[in-house]
Structure formats: structure tokens, C-alpha cells
Image (spheres, rainbow, N blue to C red):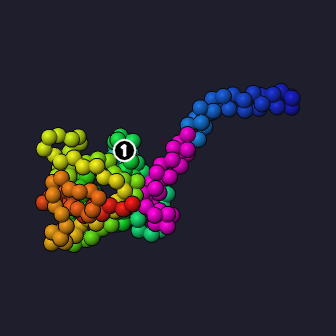
Amino acid sequence: MHRTLSLHTSLASALLLVIAAPALAGKSEAKQDDQALMRSAMSAAPAKVAAGATLVAMQADGSMRTLRSGSNGFTCMPDNPATPGPDPMCMDANALAWAHAWIGHTTPAQGKIGFMYMLEGGTDASNTDPYATRPTAGNHWVKTGPHVMIVGADPAFYALYPRDADPDTSVPYVMWPDTPYEHLMIPVK
């Protein structure tokens, strides 16, 4: 009887491994994917900022999933595989609120200055239309390299910087001028 129970236990264990292996592999892949997402998110900011930041990833439904909780008030997001080029970003609480307003097509709070890192550069974008998804003859597409951004400042602040539709992206300039989402782009090397 003991030998039969042992055989059944062994068979059950083997069957469980055969059935569970794909699910376990999926969990392993998910963990690897999360590790890749976290590396991408952390590449957006200086190492000391990224080390203490909350890391989140956008889900297909637009919700955010926390990959790791942080303690320094910054939130970093990984590269978006749906867009060409790198675009991981890391932002403080005010910049995160500004980004939520932009994504939600609402007016961001003015006077709540936020700071955002994009040290891997950004996906090419229109410099005049915050919601353009591809270049057209009139939307002034720009290519951005590594940069930081100041968002949420009073419009008078932005008036101090170039506001050209086709800016020199090697110097600070205002992106999306004369929209509620105008912000200062500051290239870094």
C-alpha cells in the first residue's frame, strides 16, 4: 500500500509538473519582462534618482501597474514598444499630474512646476500639436535626443525661450507653444 501511494504521489507530481510547466514558464517570462521594463524605466533618469523611484508600466487598457514602489517622489515609466524610438521617462509628482492632464485632454494646473527626465531621448513628435501621431506637412515634426523637461510653469517663464515651430533642438526651446501643454525642452548630452 505504501509503495502504491508513493507511486501515485510520484505520478501526480510528474503530471503536475507537465501541466504546470507552461504556467510556470509564463510566470518566469513575466518576471523577466518585468525586469526588462524596470531596466528601461530606470534608464530615463540618473542612477540615484532611478534607484529610489516608483516604477510603473502602462497596461493595454491605459491603467498603470506598479513594478516597484519607490520613496523619492519620482515615478519612472519604461519605453513604449508601440512607438518607434526610445521614450522611457521619469517625473516628479507635479510632472506626473501634468502628464495625466495631457493624456486625459484636460488643462494642467499652472504654477505647479514639474521636472521630467528623458535621458534616453524621446520618440519624434510634433512640436506644435500635442496629439499628433505622425508627421504631416504642417505639424512641425522634431527629433529629440536626451533631454529634461520643465512643465507646469507660468506662461511668462516659457516666453523667455525660443518658441519656434521648427526649433533648434540642440538648445532649450518650448515644445507645444501656445497650448495648455507647453513645456521647456532642455537637451542634455
Q: Look at label 1 and name its amino acid.
A: Gly
Start and end of the magenta stretch?
29-56
Query: What secondary structure is the magenta-colored segment mainly?
Result: helix
Residue 41 image offset from top left, x and y in percent = 44, 54
- Which corner quadrant of the image does residue 100 belong to? bottom left
Q: Is residue 184 visible?
A: yes
At horizontal 43% and vertical 61% (from top left) the residue drawn is: 45
Circle 1 residues within 10 Å: few <14, some 14–19, many ≥20:
some
Horizontal arrangement in the rendering, residue 49 relative to residue 7 (left or right): left
Relative depth, front residue between 170 and 106: 170
At horizontal 72% and vertical 32% (from top left) the residue drawn is: 13
Relative depth, front residue between 98 and 123: 123
Q: Which residue is mark 1?
A: 85
Relative depth, front residue between 171 and 79: 171
Element marked by disc 1: loop
Residue 64 image offset from top left, x and y in percent = 38, 51
Horizontal arrangement in the rendering, residue 69 relative to residue 144 (left or right): right
Q: Is residue 7 magenta?
A: no
- Which corner quadrant of the image does residue 24 belong to? top right
Q: If the image is split into quadrants, where does the C terminus sit? A: bottom left
Residue 156 image offset from top left, x and y in percent = 15, 72
Residue 129 image offset from top left, x and y in percent = 17, 50
At horizontal 29% and vertical 58% (from top left) the residue drawn is: 170
- Which corner quadrant of the image does residue 135 belong to? top left
Q: Is residue 54 magenta?
A: yes
At horizontal 30% and vertical 63% (from top left) the residue drawn is: 186
Q: If the image is split into quadrants, where does the N terminus sit? A: top right
Q: Is residue 76 visible?
A: no
